Amino acid sequence: MIILQNGVFKEREEAYLDLDDRGCQFGDGVYEVVGVYEGAFFTLDEHLERLERSSREIRLVLPLSIEELKQSLSELAEKNGLENGSVYIQVTRGACARNHAFPDSSVRAEWLAYPMNPRKPSLEQLHGVGLKTSEDMRWLRCDIKSLNLLGNVMAKQEALENGCYEALLHRNGMITEGASTNFYVIKDGAVYTHPANNLILNGITRMKIKEICNNENIPFYEQPFQLGNLKEADEAFITSTTIEIVPVKLVDHQIIGSGVPGSLTRKLQELFKQEIQ
Ligand code: PDD
């Protein structure tokens, strides 16, 4: 595999990360995962815009322009012959002797990009999955796609250990999102999801779903949803770049709707498929 490190193409084995990289020591950096379909990036501009925003919010100066990054990423995909999969991009505040405070301006941000080939969850997309509820222990800036993912990691692991596919995070019963996905419920033909504020990551897939709903006259409400109201939901689903749209049939021991993927979730899956083709 060919990877990109600070603008230089290398074999994966030649990549080198400094012991004092702030990404490792403090999770002091930001990242993106961008999907690739039939050799083309999907919603690349939106992902790079979010990367720029995340960097700005943590006062990290990107070491290259978005145009330069775009050019490098397409070369990376080409060099790897990447047809379907995704590319991981990471930027950290650089490497210097460990100290919580920012390094001085002579320390340059370090960046990496490389292809990933995550398994597409085809069976899960077809049959639906179960979620495990978990108190959302994360900080109050979940809108930043930062490398600090311990709250997400702990919740995901707990979900897996309980035979579930994903965690369903909530703050005092108010559902926010999944450990690495956005969450939606469907009630009487309308889609409900948490507002895009500081408590969730505004997923690029979420933005696409919103756009599809608007185009199709499917009501899309950005309103918090309570765990206690899940029993009234007709359908539920989760989304992300890597899983696209996966129906939810179970939350803890509670069956959602009829317990099988519903018709509006199916319709959204179909419409989303048209977007990526
Ligand atoms: N995760 N919420 C969280 C907490 C996420 O980590 C992600 C994405 C999403 C969905 O965002 P998008 O639709 O832009 O992929 C929502 C990525 C895929 C990851 O960490 O691997």
Image: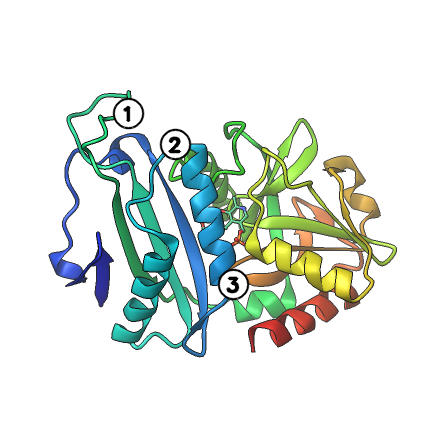
Q: Taking 34 as reference, is 104 left or right?
A: left
What element does badge 1 sit on? loop
* Image position of 60 with respect to 50: above or below: above
Q: Taking 23 as reference, is 36 left or right?
A: right
| Residue type, label 3 | Thr
| Mark 2 or mark 3, whichever is nearer to me | 2
| Residue type, label 1 | Phe
Q: How many marks?
A: 3
In primary-sequence order, the first of circles 2 and 3 is: 3
In primary-sequence order, the first of circles 2 and 1 is: 2
Tag 2 near tag 1, CB within 8 Å: yes
Residue 260 visible here: no
Residue receiving disc 1: 102
The image position of residue 228, as x and y in percent, is 77, 36
Residue ID at (43%, 47%): 51
Q: Which mark is residue 59?
A: 2
Q: CA distance from mark 2 to mark 1?
A: 10 Å
Q: Assign the C terminus to one quadrant of the image.
A: bottom right
Residue ID at (15%, 40%): 18
Q: Characterize the local packing of mark 1: few (<14), some (14-19) or many (20 or more) Cα atoms within 10 angstroms.
A: some
Instruction: Specify the quadrant of the image occupied by residue 29.
Output: top left
Q: Characterize the local packing of mark 3: few (<14), some (14-19) or many (20 or more) Cα atoms within 10 angstroms.
A: some
Q: CA distance from mark 2 to mark 3?
A: 24 Å
What element does badge 2 sit on? loop
Residue receiving disc 3: 43
Q: Taking 230 as reference, is 71 left or right?
A: left
Tag 1 near tag 3, CB within 8 Å: no
Q: CA distance from mark 1 to mark 3?
A: 32 Å
